[in-house]
Each structure stands twice: as structure tokens, then as C-alpha cells.
Image (cartoon, coloured by chain):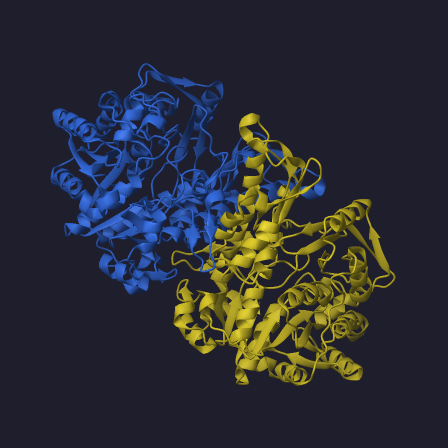
Chain colours: A blue, B yellow
């Protein structure tokens, strides 16, 4: 049997006109702005009132391995399962970044029979949202450098411009650059760098804003640097918050697409969870909450990253809560956490599964720390053995944790019915959601609480720079912001090689950066970088297009 | 009377659903990909055969003044006039760049009652084409730097990478930069710079390709740098021409919109004419030639820039010819060319008009050098006096040049009827189109011929660098490419302060750069820069957006 790629499966799927999906979702025709036949933007001003008591199901995961654990696949499959059970369900996902698409990961639209469509368009440019964010971010950079060049009335210290440029690209050569070289016609020289677009504060702001006016106001609050006497300078002082928001006029509207089984899907906003807050937009989640009874949404990487930030940042700012948490686990990831090398993952090794399960255990504990009951989704892979599967499921039974084997990759929604039923049990019971910390806790203690409670570490080493930055942050009145941790996704610690459930470790915070538009402070740990690099052979070399415009190599 | 801005006029216009425009243009439903209610991309594979003998009307101009002379306005108004005369007409325009929109020029969608709609969306992001080009260009940059970083099998000399990054932005601080700083994790340090996207060779290639496969092949031919032993290295050798073309999957499709009077308009591709070849895409022009009897298209700036390049590059590569040339002139521009300062333009000064008319005269001669009869469109401004207008029109009568006063800004198509009728006279007579030079003429002589014949100069000074580069170009077998001149738009010479009809000047060519994908060589003259800067107070500070998503300040 020839194994089809996800892209080949997607191209054979029976895709419906997006107008039909809108009808199903209860979106009125006047709210719909078509982008081709299968995508639309939603004018949220046309989605009338009556916010329903939708239940929010958050899909998180154990720590991933380099290959990815199929969290998007499970999120899509779970929503299709609810759809099959006759529920009024919507799924809310993040938009893919071109960096990983061209680099190593490929597309980010799920897999097998649990995908969102149209796969190619979502993976490439997708209605232009990320490009609009890139443009808005870099327009601000141009305005800043132009202001300095044209007399610098605001007295901006070129050495203290914290705003970086961005591209939706994996491009390590842009991590650290010098701009403004070549004499007076070419601006004022200063050190700069590019982040990947998903790490831009504009992305965070777009994902945390209520609407376009809130977005504009938040952009106005962004501190992009400091004067020579160290006073923060905001976008409002440059008078360009209107122009920057205008560039996001269309990007602020959530995008409607569909799963392969015709479940309505909103895909909007896409900050990475290792270097940003890792959740789709509040606007999309709230739109889905108005339209559906059950909203299935994901957050990036494990519960230590996207999960923690969903609770402490997105849910806090949005004033809502998750009603159930799904934790995606795979036999392969458990084995890797149990010490098996990548090349040996296809061999049965039940012992390694059991010894790696401590990683999953910590993520289960984390969900409960937030007062929400988890359900383990054991995402089936063809190489898994019955013994291995049973080892996981029986461990869950012993620990009193709901768990279900999900076969959504192979079977679509039908393969997620058991999972959906387990989630429904949780949704029917009362949860006691709580944030991990109050806003007013000092910044250092917030970070320490996340490290000790969520990561299971002993404590935090703050670099001298981080200490100085925290002092400045609190002096400037930003101490009440929640913290957005930037950390490796592969380990509960800040060291990607420490798999399983590391203990006795400390986390090093090397920088703490205020994001006054988004309203959080970013703590950079370990050697996490906000601009990824490409591998020796990028996915791009396998990509192609034919005369009919069909693509190849997007996985 | 309150004067409305172009944006206010546009927002009050009676815009039709784009499906109606498609019906009018004869575009079948299956070729239409809607982008919202008023824009669509065209799948050219669905536009069936029978290429008609459409007449092509090229709108060019005298040398512009800093305020712009309304060439887009005249192009739109002329097509509306043909429409009013019952002709089957389409207009083919270039896409605006965000650089000028945010910088000094504002939008580029015509003005008054001669605009294309929807004005906001065309000026902002417009179906993502420029962003896709930016991304394709910068993906190639990332692949190049990654290749060097990952062992450099192709032996690329980092000092000889000629491929620059781009942004659709006016950002002088990026003109000259150093990338790859910060140690081994951050790539290999080298000098680099950003051009504005419209100057990217990807833009040129997109505008000169016949279809997606031709586009991919041309991208494969791009030389992005040289090895340590000075051998050219192509994109094909990096094996990423498929991925780069894939990123242009949608951008390669022309965009259908409408004029305020419902004339079908294709807007596609947007290279600047001072630093690139300055014409909309061949794909759009050819699509319009299949659908309409008359195609009105523009080229950037004066006949010395976009005009010359339309003839010698676009028409040559496309194998077609213009059947009439419209030269847009204004009393204001003539006065400036006659020595009047910008602040005094509103005062009547017929003498200055007459003394500036030598500039227009040269552009008339230029059109005739290409064997095509020109028609002067005197684009009316409210501050023009009857004496001034009559001075221009009677001069034209004396010289035996067709001319018409056009009032398309105030009156739409109705204000362009006289112009349309004069153009129809030309279309009914035989033209003897010829290129200015044969492919096989040596590069130096091509440049000299353009300078002496089109600019009216005495000759060319080639810098030592340019001489070396021309030698390399001819050694590498690229000597038969046409030349793409990069020159100031304000003067027939390479010195923007020399207005009127300068004589006895020489043009300095400082660099000659092969563009082996586009198939031309760029000659950089004077101090022309391929990345513009922002003015002290950019247009952006006047822009805003309201809660309903309406924009302000796009002019």
C-alpha cells in the first residue's frame, strides 16, 4: 500500500463552498468576506450579540519530541467527533508561520483525515494576516529610524531601541545585524535584529485585542525604546498608532475555513508558544464562543508553555476559562522521554513507555493545578504496539485520569468519539479554574511560581541584566503584567536535553522584556532564540508547483 | 465648498459586485476567485484561447514634478471614456507599493472621479501580491545564507552575494547593513542591504513571465552571487526555484477590480520605473488583450523611463506593440520645467508654460522615435488659467501633435471623451513600431543609445566598476539582454535638478547589474537609490481607522 502524504489526502478531500460552512456555523451572509471559494474573513461587527455559554475545551500536550505529536490533528479530530455526535461545535486554531513550513516542520493544518482545508492556502500566506503583521511591525521600525534620522525630537537613544524588525522566515543571519551604515544618506547606525513574525509584539497585541479600536490603543501603548535619560517612548508619541492599526484592518478579522468533515474552523493569529504566548486570537475564540456550544481550541507545545500561558495570559485577559483540558500524548513521545533514541522509536519498548510517563504525569498535575480536569488523548501511530498502548491507558486508569485512544489521523472524527465522550463527562461537571498567580505578585515571584509549580524546578537564576530589567519594569509601573515565558518546548526545564520529569533544576532567566502593548513581560530563559534557523536541507528543496498551480512538498 | 479627498470620493462611489464586472469583461465564472466582494483573482488557465487583435494604448507622460501629474487618473479616465463611447475596453495598471503610501505620495489608485475601487484595499496589501514577492525574495536570501552557514558546498563567496533582501517599505536605515553578527549561531557575517520590494528581481520576473512554469524557470536562472573563483551561482543550483515559485502561486494571478464607472480593471505587478522596469505584468496585459478590444495601460514616470522600458523590455519580451501613446502633461509641470518654484505654481505664468514645453516636446519626439504617434493629454487642474491651457493646446496644433484637454478628475470618463476620440484616430492609422536597439548591440552601446536618443544627452560616463561589470556580463553571455535604466524621474538627465530639456549633459553609470531571471541588465545612474526613505513627517501620521474599519488619510 502506498502511503499518501497529508497534502495528497487533503487534495482528494470533499471540500464545501465556504458559504455552506458559514450557514452551518450560524454566520450571517453580511458578515462574510470571501477569499476565494473556501476561505472567508468574518466581520465581527456583524455577528450579533447573545454570547452563549459555550464550553471551552483546551487541547494541550505533554512535552513534544522534535517530530511533533499531532496536537493540531487531535484538535481537529476532536472537533469532528463532537460534530459527529451532533454537537454545535467550532474549532479555533492558530495560523501557520512560513518559517517552519519552509524549514523543518512543514505545514500546520493537522494530518491524515483530521485536517483543516484548504491546506495549501492555509499554509501559504493565508489571507495575508502574517504579512500584514510583518508590515505593521516593520513600518514602526522605519518610523523609529526615520525619526532618529530626521532630528530625533523625542531624544530616542539609538542604543536603547528595543523594537526589532521581523520576517515570517527562519533566517539566523538576521538575528544580529547593524543597520544605518553607509553615511548620512543611510540613517543612523545602530545594532538591530530580526525576530520571526510570530514573536512580534504586534502579533501578541492582535491576539489579545477585543476589536480594532482596542488593538489601536494597545499599539499606542507599545514602548519601543528609551530616551537618552532612560524614559520609555511609546508609539503614541510617534503618532503612528493609527497607521499601524490601519495596516491590520483586514488581519484583525478572523478567518473561517473547514475541517475535512465540514466542521467550521476559525484560524486566526499564530504566536509561537516557546517564544510568545502561543494561543490563537481572543477575537476568534470569542467569536466561536458566540456561535457554538462547544469551542475546541489549542495552545502551542506542552502544558508548561502554551497551556500555562493560555491560563495566565489569554484566559485572564479574555475573562473566560477552559472547561476541560485535553493532553495529547503519544507512545513515541513517551518512549523518547523514557530514553529511547529517535532512530529506535519504531521498536516496541513498553518499559521505556512506562519510564517516560512521568512527563505526562507532570502535565496532568499541571492541569489540575489550574483547577481543570484533564483528559489524556493517546494519539495513535501505526508503529505503536498493543502492549505499549495498553501500558499508557492502564496507567491512566490506575491514576484516576480519563484517557482515550484516538485514531483521528486514520479515521477522522470517528476515531475521536471515545475522546469526545470522555471530554463531555468533564464538561458536565463543575471545574474550579484559577490563575496561578495574582497580577500584583512581584515579577520575580511570578516567574518563580511558574518555574516551581508548572515546570517542577527548584528555583530561578536571574542574570544581572534580568535583575536590572525587572527593577526598571517595576519602576515604570509594569510590574502587574503577567509573565510570558520563553523556553525550550522539549523539556519541562530550560535545557532541551532534560527529558522525562527533571527534578532539582533551576531555570536561568537571562532577559526580561516589557511588552506594554500586549500587556505582559517576556522572560527569556536558557538559550531560546526569537528567530529560528533553517536546517541543512530545508523542506523548501522538496517543494514544487505544476502548470495547474498545484503544489508539492507541503506534507 | 468643501473639497473632498480622493478617499472620501471613493468611499461614496457606487461600487458593483465584482461578479458583475467579470460578466462585463467576459471572464467566465470558473476563472474567478473572489477576494471579498469587490476584488477577484483570475485563473488565466480558465480564460480560453482566441487572442483578439486588441489595440494597446500606452499612457506615458512628460517628466513629473514631485507632486505627481495624475497619470493613473488619466489612464483610468481614458478607459472610462472609451467605455462611455461603447468600446469593449479594459485598463491594466500597476499595484501600489506601501512605501509611498506610508511615505509621501499616498495612494496610487487615480483621483477624483477617475479612480479604481476599492481604493483602500488596493492601496493596502491588495490581495497579498507584494507580500508574496517580499517573502519569495527573502526566502531566497535565507536559503543563501543558510547554505553558506551549513558548509557552503557551492563555494559561494559571502563578499559576492549580489542578492539583496527586500521590504515593501521606505526604510533608509536598511540600505546598507551587516548581517550574521554575533558568533557561529548567527550565521556568517557579510555586508547586505534591503531594497524596496518593487525593485526586487522577483517582481521583475513576475511581471515578465508568461505563466507559473515560465516564472519558475526564470527564477531558476537568477544569479544571486558568485563563487570564490567568480563563477555565477544560480537559484537552480540551490534547488529552491520550486519553493520560491510556490510562494508566488497566488501572486502570479492578475487581480480584477473596477473603475468608479464600472470599467473592468486588471491591476497586477508594480515595479517602479525609476529603479525597475515600471510596467504592470505581461500576464495581466495579455489577459486584457484576450478579453477586450482596447487595452489602456500605463508605465511609470515619463517616456524616458517607463515609456522607454515598456518598448524595449516589456513589448520586446511580450512580442506585442503599443498602437498609440498618450503623453500626460499638466500646466503645473510645464511651469515647473519652465523655472517656476513649487510654491508659485498657482499663479498664472504663460511664459513659463511655453518655456517649459521643451520638456513635453522631447517626450513627443521620443514616442515618434519608437514609431508610434503620441496624443498629448493636458490633465486639467483647478488652478490652471485659460491662457495657460490655450498656450499648450495651440503649441500642439502648430507642431502637428494631437492634444486634448482632459477633465477626468472632475468629470470622470465624460471629461476624457476628447482624448479618447483623438486616440481612436491614431488607432485607426497604421503605426510603425520599432525597438530602439537590437538585442545583439553591445551593452555599452545600448546604454549610449538610450542616453543620446531618448534622454537627449551627449554620452555616458561609465565608472570603473561599471566597466568591469559590463565586461563580466558579456563574458558570462548576458550581453544580449536589454538594459533597464535606473535614473531620476524628475529630469531627462541623471541630475534631478536639470528640468526642461537639458542639453550637452552626460549620464554617469555607476553600476551595471545582471538580472538573469528577468533577462535584463540594470544600469544605475546618478545617485538613484533602490530603497527610498521617509520624509520628516510621513503620511502615516495622518492615517487612522475607526471602529467600523473605515480608514482615514489614504488620500
The answer to whether any part of residue B100 appears in the image is no
Relative vertical location of residue A83 with respect to residue A233 in this rendering, above or below: below
Q: Position of residue B218 (x, y in %)?
A: 59, 54
Q: Name the quadrant of the C terminus of chain A.
A: top left
Of the pair A373 and A159, the residue shown nearer to us: A373
Q: Which quarter of the rendering shows the N terminus of chain A? A: top left
Reply above or below: B80 against A305.
below
Question: Relative to residue A178, is residue A73 drawn left or right?
Answer: left
Image coords of residue B204 (percent x, y): 61, 57
Q: Residue B356 placed where, x, y %?
A: 79, 70
**Above or below, comparing residue B508 to residue B355 in the picture:** above
Residue in front for this viewpoint, A383 or A440: A383
Q: Nearer the viewer, residue B342 or B408?
A: B408
The reply to whether residue B441 is visible in this rendering is yes
Q: Percent x, y for residue A165?
A: 53, 40
Q: Residue furthest front?
A: A1
Amino acid at each position: 500500500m502506498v502511503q499518501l502524504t497529508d497534502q495528497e489526502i487533503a487534495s482528494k478531500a470533499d471540500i464545501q463552498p465556504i458559504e455552506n460552512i458559514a450557514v452551518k456555523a450560524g454566520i450571517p451572509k453580511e458578515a462574510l468576506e470571501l477569499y476565494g471559494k473556501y476561505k472567508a474573513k468574518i466581520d465581527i461587527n456583524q455577528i450579533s450579540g447573545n454570547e452563549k455559554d459555550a464550553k471551552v475545551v483546551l487541547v494541550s500536550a505533554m512535552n513534544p519530541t522534535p517530530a511533533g505529536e499531532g496536537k493540531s490533528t487531535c484538535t481537529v479530530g476532536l472537533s469532528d467527533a463532537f460534530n459527529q455526535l451532533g454537537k454545535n461545535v467550532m474549532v479555533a486554531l492558530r495560523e501557520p508561520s512560513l518559517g517552519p513550513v519552509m524549514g523543518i516542520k512543514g505545514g500546520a493544518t493537522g494530518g491524515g483525515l483530521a485536517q483543516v482545508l484548504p491546506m495549501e492556502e492555509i499554509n501559504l500566506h493565508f489571507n495575508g494576516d502574517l504579512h500584514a503583521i510583518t508590515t505593521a511591525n516593520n513600518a514602526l521600525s522605519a518610523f523609529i529610524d526615520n525619526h532618529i534620522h530626521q532630528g530625533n525630537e523625542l531624544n530616542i537613544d539609538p542604543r536603547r531601541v528595543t523594537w526589532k524588525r521581523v520576517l515570517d522566515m527562519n533566517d539566523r543571519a538576521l538575528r544580529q545585524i547593524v543597520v544605518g551604515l553607509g553615511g548620512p544618506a543611510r540613517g543612523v547606525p545602530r545594532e538591530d535584529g530580526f525576530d520571526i513574525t510570530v514573536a512580534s509584539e504586534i502579533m501578541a497585541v492582535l491576539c489579545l485585542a477585543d476589536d480594532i479600536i482596542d488593538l489601536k490603543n494597545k499599539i499606542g501603548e507599545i514602548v519601543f525604546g528609551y530616551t537618552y535619560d532612560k524614559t520609555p517612548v511609546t508609539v503614541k508619541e510617534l503618532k503612528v498608532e493609527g497607521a499601524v492599526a490601519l495596516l491590520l484592518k483586514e488581519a484583525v478579522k478572523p478567518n473561517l475555513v473547514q475541517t475535512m468533515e465540514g466542521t467550521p474552523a476559525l484560524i486566526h493569529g499564530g504566536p509561537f508558544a516557546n517564544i510568545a504566548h502561543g494561543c490563537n486570537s481572543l477575537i476568534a475564540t470569542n467569536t466561536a464562543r458566540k456561535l457554538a456550544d462547544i469551542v475546541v481550541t489549542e495552545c502551542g507545545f506542552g502544558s508548561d508553555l502554551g497551556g500555562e500561558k493560555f491560563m495566565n495570559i489569554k484566559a485572564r485577559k479574555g475573562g473566560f476559562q477552559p472547561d476541560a483540558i485535553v493532553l495529547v500524548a503519544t507512545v513515541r513521545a513517551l518512549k523518547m522521554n523514557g530514553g529511547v533514541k529517535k532512530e529506535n522509536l519504531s521498536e516496541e519498548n513498553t518499559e521505556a513507555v512506562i519510564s517516560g510517563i512521568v512527563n505526562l504525569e507532570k502535565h496532568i498535575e499541571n492541569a489540575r493545578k489550574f483547577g481543570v480536569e484533564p483528559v489524556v488523548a493517546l494519539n495513535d501511530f501505526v508503529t505503536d504496539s498493543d502492549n505499549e498502548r495498553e501500558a499508557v491507558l492502564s496507567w491512566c486508569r490506575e491514576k484516576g485520569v480519563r484517557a482515550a485512544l484516538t485514531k483521528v489521523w486514520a479515521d477522522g472524527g470517528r476515531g475521536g468519539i471515545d475522546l469526545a465522550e470522555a471530554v463531555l463527562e468533564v464538561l458536565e461537571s463543575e471545574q474550579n479554574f484559577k490563575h496561578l498567580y495574582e497580577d500584583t505578585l512581584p515579577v520575580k515571584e511570578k516567574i518563580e511560581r511558574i518555574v516551581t509549580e508548572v515546570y517542577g524546578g527548584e528555583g530561578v537564576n536571574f542574570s544581572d541584566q534580568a535583575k536590572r530589567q525587572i527593577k526598571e519594569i517595576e519602576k515604570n509601573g509594569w510590574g502587574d503584567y503577567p509573565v510570558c515565558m520563553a523556553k525550550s518546548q522539549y523539556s519541562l526545564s530550560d535545557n532541551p536535553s532534560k527529558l522525562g520529569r527533571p527534578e532539582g533544576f533551576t531555570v536561568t532567566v537571562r532577559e526580561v522584556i516589557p511588552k506594554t502593548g500586549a500587556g505582559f513581560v517576556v522572560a527569556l530563559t536558557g538559550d531560546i532564540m526569537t528567530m529560528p534557523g533553517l536546517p541543512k536541507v530545508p523542506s523548501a528543496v522538496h517543494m514544487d508547483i505544476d502548470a495547474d498551480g498545484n503544489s508539492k512538498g507541503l506534507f
